[in-house]
Amino acid sequence: MTLLLDKILASIVQITLFSLIPFIWWYFSGKKQEKFTHWIGLKKITGNKKRIILAIITLSILFMILGAIILLSLKNIKMATSVFKGLGLSALPAILVYAVFNTAFPEELIFRGFILKRISNKFGFTYGNCVQAILFALLHGVMFIPLVGIIKSLLIVIFTGLIAYSMGYVNEKIAHGSIIPSWIIHSLSNIFSGICAAYMLI
């Protein structure tokens, strides 16, 4: 129960912090044009539903495979999911909160909701998507350099960057600007990593 409460509190703090700069930016620049939720991409998915579902399933599987590879290469290294190690089913509520609200949601808000959209509006989609993907990849890879070395960290950066670029593409080009597809993909990947830790599968 303590673990679940910790993850709920951490989620509230994380979402608040990751929403602060986008909210201030919207307040002074986009408030008159549209609601904050639409401006950041928290809106109904529109577009070809079959294509969107296929993209979500495909990227979720790829992200989980990537997650498994990363977990194997970082097997004895402490990570965010290490708190669930060996807890089994009792960790599931905390894993769900961690995966959906503590990590995936705030990261989608800042990377695909804020950075991608703002840079794309100024310099075009390709540039915006590359920037958000690189920043997302660096956030997830650079921290491992002291632990696993440059080569493994570089592979993590490349893989996560490709996934981030693909998620940005799905959101903007297939789901018409909604960040919900990437939020689902990201959440499923994090749930998978949490379950792997809880059941010590990898």
Image: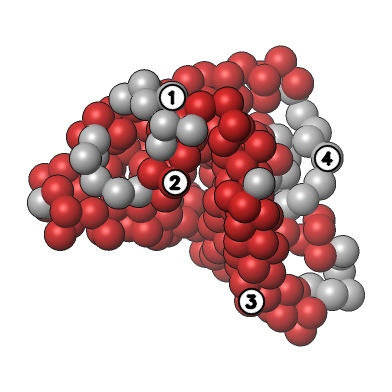
> Nearer the observer, disc 3 or disc 1?
1
Rendering coords of residue 171 (x, y %): 63, 40
The amino acid beneath tag 2 is Val
Q: Is residue 134 visible?
A: no
Q: Secondary structure at mark 4?
A: loop
Q: How is the image coloured?
A: secondary structure
Q: Residue under circle 4?
A: 44
Q: CA distance from mark 1 to mark 2?
A: 12 Å
Q: CA distance from mark 3 to mark 4?
A: 23 Å
Rendering coords of residue 34 (x, y %): 86, 64
Q: Secondary structure at mark 3?
A: helix
> Nearer the observer, disc 1 or disc 4?
1
Q: Residue under circle 2?
A: 83
Q: Quadrant of residue 72?
A: top left
Q: Residue under circle 3?
A: 21
Mark positioned earlier in the residue sequence (2 or 3): 3
- Count residues near mark 3 (Cα–Cα under 10 Å), then give few for <14, some for 14-19, many for 20+: few
Q: Residue under circle 1?
A: 199
Nearest the viewer among 96 and 54 is 96
Mark positioned earlier in the residue sequence (2 or 4): 4
Rendering coords of residue 200 (x, y %): 37, 26
Q: Quadrant of residue 124?
A: bottom right
State the residue at coordinates (61%, 42%).
94
With respect to residue 81, does 113 lie above or below? below
> Nearer the observer, disc 2 or disc 4?
2
